[in-house]
Amino acid sequence: MNSDDKPKIRVLMMLEVIGKPAEHLVAALEDLIKKLDEEQGVTVQKKDIKEPKLIESKEGAQPSGFYTTFAEVEIDIEEISSLAYLIFRYMPAHIEVISPEVIALTNNGWNELFNELSRKLHGYDEVVRIVQVEKNILEKKLKELMGKSEGEEK
């Protein structure tokens, strides 16, 4: 059996965007779907981009002026491990594996999947640690400046 005979995995992804102006959201989703279709081992089968809607403001708050919309995108992928990569790359709001009903992975497949997950989590953890250190430095500098300005006022 060659790779062309291997059944594809059909996945439904919902990609969501927020921003303004409204017309840019549809264009952003179109670009995102185009990039998704260009990924190795991924074929976009269907797409349905919804019309942007204005985000309603909370009671008493100023209107946000921001819009939101989403696209339902059906894709075929060759390997389930590719789905983990796509999840981290495109951050879909929802994922549904449509077919096949059962997906078996070898030890190597599980290893690839878990290593990709681990790599991404370590990357995010590193970013969070850097941001925490920078936040602490900024807080310290702000306290020093506030202390100086209070001393100057007296």
Image (tube, rainbow, N blue to C red):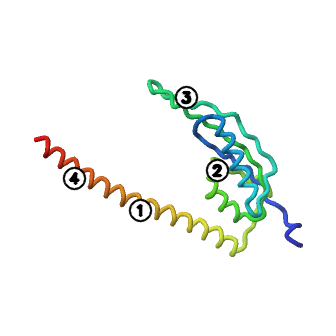
Residue at position x 44%, y 24% from top? 60
Distance from label 3 to label 4 (Cα)?
A: 40 Å
According to the image, label 1 marks what residue?
Answer: 129
- Image x and y of residue 93, in percent: 63, 47
Mark 2: secondary structure: loop
- Image x and y of residue 119, in percent: 56, 68
Classify mark 4: residues with Cα within 10 Å, few (<14), some (14-19) or many (20+). Answer: few
Residue, far bottom: 108
First in residue order: circle 3 vs circle 4: 3
According to the image, label 3 marks what residue?
Answer: 56
Name the residue type under label 2. Pro
Quadrant in which the C terminus is drawn: top left
Mark 1 and 4 residues: CB-CB less than 8 Å, in contact? no
- Image x and y of residue 109, in percent: 70, 71
Name the residue type under label 4. Glu
66, above or below 103, in the image: above
Distance from label 3 to label 1 (Cα)?
A: 34 Å
Mark 3: secondary structure: loop
Name the residue type under label 3. Glu
Name the residue type under label 1. Arg
In the depicted view, which residue is nearer to us: 120 or 146? 146
According to the image, label 4 marks what residue?
Answer: 144
149, above or below 135, in the image: above
